[in-house]
Amino acid sequence: RSGSITGEIQIFPIVEVLEFLKVHRSTGVLEIRNRTMQGHLRIQNGDLIGGQSPSSSNILSILVRLNAITKDDLEVTILDEGEDQLQLGLNMVEDGIISADVLQHAMQIQVETALIELLNCKEGDFSFSEARAVSNGASRRSPASRSSMRTSPARSRRAWGLAPVRKPSTSPS
């Protein structure tokens, strides 16, 4: 099933739109805009899994602020991996530069900042575009979801629709 919802925030406040999407276990992107700002929230199976607003920082900047990585790490990583923020973070977890918990904490900071700012938007428009969830039988919760703060990096990759990491065979730990 594919669909979209559009409306005015004055008539349907964002919190009510999020409740509707939660009840219907929707997956997609809720875009919110008015004269002064624009942002979005990513939803998967009704759960908030990501977001961006004018005041929310990108994941890598948050990791630098948390002293989890240095600006030098950031420059090398971007040169090696490109500019996909989540993929860079997941690669840092895979490479042992940061822990999955640190990445999840950074993602939670980003989502909470975006959510607070976007929920305070009292006028403007919203549009939700439904997208198909990745169906690989794995858990669909994001690492940014409060109820999955202890997910593994492999689960995080699946939650974001990325291929799982294949680790070399080693002795069990």
Image (cartoon, grey):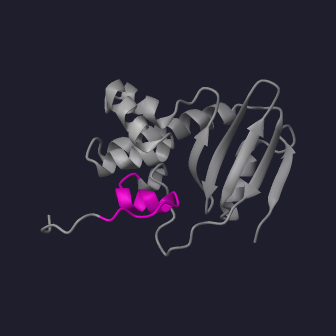
Residue 44 quadrant: bottom right
Above or below, 53 relative to 12: above
Q: Is residue 155 magenta?
A: yes
Residue 147 horizontal side relative to residue 117, left or right: left
Residue at 71%, 48% (x, y): give it. 30
Residue 147 quadrant: bottom left
Pinpoint residue 76: horizontal percent, then vertical percent.
Answer: 35, 33
Residue 70 in view in this figure: no
Residue at 82%, 45% (x, y): give it. 12
Q: Nearer the viewer, residue 59 or 55?
A: 59
Residue 110 in view in this figure: yes
Q: Nearer the viewer, residue 75 or 143?
A: 75
Q: Nearer the viewer, residue 120 or 130?
A: 130
In the rendered image, the quadrant that contains the C terminus is: bottom left
Residue at 82%, 32% (x, y): give it. 123
Pinpoint residue 171: horizontal percent, then vertical percent.
Answer: 12, 68
User: Which region shows up in magenta?
Assistant: 149-166
Residue 152 horizontal side relative to residue 31, left or right: left
Residue 14 quadrant: top right
**Looking at this rendering, what residue extends furthest in the bottom direction?**
137
Pinpoint residue 118: horizontal percent, then vertical percent.
Answer: 68, 35
Residue at 39%, 25% (x, y): give it. 65
Report the number of numbered marks: 0
Q: Is residue 21 magenta?
A: no
Residue 155 horizontal side relative to residue 36, left or right: left
Pinpoint residue 42: horizontal percent, then vertical percent.
Answer: 62, 50
Magenta stretch, overall SS: loop
In the rendered image, the quadrant that contains the N terminus is: bottom right
